[in-house]
Amino acid sequence: MKIDRTHMVLLLLAITVVAFPLLLTDKSFVSADEALFLRINGYWNPTFDSFFRISTELGSFTFWFVAIFVLWIFGQRTFATYLLVAIAVHIALGGSMKYIIDRPRPFDVFSDAFAVYNPTDPSFPSGHTEGSFAAAAVLGLRSKKLLFPLILLAIFVGLSRVYIGVHFPFDVISGAVFGALIGVFVAGLDLSRLQERMESVWKRILRPLRCEWK
């Protein structure tokens, strides 16, 4: 039986979602991951603080939902639709895995770790990184000129999550892999009907506003 690219990507995503958490059961692997975190986190310097704070916010749910709205308003509705679905899948997958795996945050493991703030949800995988790579993949495959800048943004978001002390390196690596596969999977879907329905809802929302302006 021939498997198309979309199904192959979905299979790879399923394999990584199962395999990556298993690595966290290996004490030596976890120890190495924690040691790498301490090394990276130890480079904290006030000079770079603002840069990494800004970088990490560019991977937040708020940023991507604002991006979806802006794309939609300015007529880039295919991009907005694909980005919306990719972020929705990312939230469903990443959010579920966080509470299933329930890995503690670095500042819960190391009392002397530097952390800009203390999120209350579990650590694995990095949601900011996953969302950023999902966006980079789905938009980059829709428009090649967006691929490099969005991947660069996603990399900085991932680095910032370790630097500011809220994720271990493996959380970020896993988030990047999951996110990239989510983006590639969603990019292979036909979302034309969803976009039509969204446009229909949008017109119904705007209709009363147009009447008021007349």
Image (tube, grey):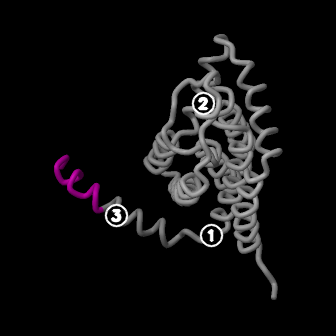
Q: Residue at x 63, y 34 (%)?
A: 109
The mark that comes first in sequence, 2 or 3, is 2
Q: Quadrant of residue 33?
A: top right
Name the residue that disc number 1 marks: 189
Name the residue that disc number 2 marks: 107
The mark that comes first in sequence, 1 or 2, is 2
Q: Is residue 78 visible?
A: no
Mark 2 and mark 3: span between their CA atoms? Answer: 44 Å
Q: For residue 206: magenta?
A: yes
Label 3 Cα neighbours within 10 Å, binned few <14 / some 14-19 / many ≥20: few
Name the residue that disc number 3 marks: 201
- In this image, 171 relative to 80: left or right? right
Is residue 182 shown above or below 38?
below
Q: Nearer the viewer, residue 174 or 134?
A: 174
Q: SS of the residue at dot 3?
A: helix
Start-end of magenta stretch:
204-214
Q: Position of residue 129 (x, y in %)?
A: 64, 43
Q: Is residue 84 visible?
A: yes
Q: SS of the residue at dot 1?
A: loop
For the residues bearing labels 1 and 2, Cβ distance under 8 angstroms: no
Mark 1 and mark 2: span between their CA atoms? Answer: 39 Å
Label 2 Cα neighbours within 10 Å, binned few <14 / some 14-19 / many ≥20: some
